[in-house]
Amino acid sequence: MKRYLILVSLLLIFLQGCNSENENQSEQAAEESELEPVTFVLDWTPNTNHTGVYVAQEEGYFAEEGLDVEIILPGEVGANQLISTGKADLGISYQEGLMMARNEDLPLVSVAAIIQHNTAGYASPVEKGIKEPADFEGKKFGGVGTELEQVMMETILEKDDVDIETVDFINIGEADFFTAIKRDVDFSLVYQAWTGIEAETRNEELNMIYLKDLDEGLDFYTPIVATSEQTIEDNPEMVEKFVKATVKGYEFAMEQPDEAANILIESVPDINEELVHESQKWLVDKYQAEADEFGIQETERWENVYEFMDENDLIKQDFDVDQAFTNEFLPKAEEVN
């Protein structure tokens, strides 16, 4: 009889545990079903430009704001097109690209700057002896064949009285920088935060000439978080919640770079772990830089870039910079912490 009672008691405990687990799963499913779905598109393969978004997802910052965020890759169409056509609610863009997109009647709006200053520059192995734009003369430049690329080079070389015709432009597309630089070209345009740091991890010493140091019109906000005018009009509350959670994610990355790097590594299979950690450390004081808060954008900086693009006929119509970006969705510092 005693054994029977013990068995009955154990069975009841087991059933209660199952009921409790089912209830928890049901509650979790209900909570997830109540979250608002949001699609966020990257500009490229996942890297440390995107860490704050992955942190916000993993740490539950999006869920706290009532959002269920799906992070997707752009594919062949491109992030700007997906955002402007409503196939993605928000995504990663860059200032110069967003301005040119608006010039083509794609109504994109920047809602936060991820990195305050342009970390792109002309990179070359030190043995090439390319230390300033004047050294570009007679060299092979590996690019992707855009008009902006040509204009930037021409503007920079004019200051040193170097004829752009003396530079051999070679389209390397998306070829690996380290392969191209050894085989096909002398220098190329890269981002220090990723390719430049990768060179350091490979013990390959590069000379880096930053665009932001060559002309104030080249100090783009890049990358940025972008959405469309239509999304802002239709669902400003969602945009505000997304930006708030994202800012919190990047604040985390600035305060805890190693942990943030681990989150990105766990979220992205086969990513270079050493590169992620080193890049994350390098970006700690680059995300916000001297700005009063993360994500802020200044009209003067947008006007500088517009003037550069207008003077070089990259913008073909009237352009209001105040419509191209907004700080209205950024949370106040005390709300983030």
Image (cartoon, helix red, strand yellow):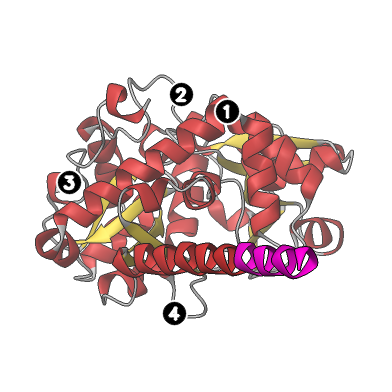
Q: Secondary structure at mark 1?
A: loop
Q: Are marks 1 and 4 in contact (CB under 8 Å)?
A: no
Q: Residues within 10 Å of mark 2 (few under 14, many from 20)?
A: some
Say if 46 sits above or below 208 in the image. below
Residue annotated with mark 2: 289
Q: Secondary structure at mark 2?
A: loop
Percent across and percent down for residue 107 are 19, 65
Q: Is residue 310 in sight in this rendering? A: no
Q: Residues within 10 Å of mark 3 (few under 14, many from 20)?
A: some
Q: Is residue 97 left or right of residue 299?
A: right
Q: Earlier in the sequence, mark 3 or mark 1?
A: 1
Which of pointers 3 and 1 indicates the residue nearer the eye? 1
Q: Earlier in the sequence, mark 4 or mark 2?
A: 4
Q: CA distance from mark 2 to mark 3?
A: 22 Å
Q: Amino acid at mark 2?
A: Ala
In the image, 204 versus 184, the foreground residue is 204
Residue annotated with mark 1: 284
The residue positioned 51% from the left and 49% from the top of the image is: 153
Q: CA distance from mark 4 to mark 2?
A: 32 Å
Quadrant where the image shows the C terminus? top left
Residue annotated with mark 3: 321
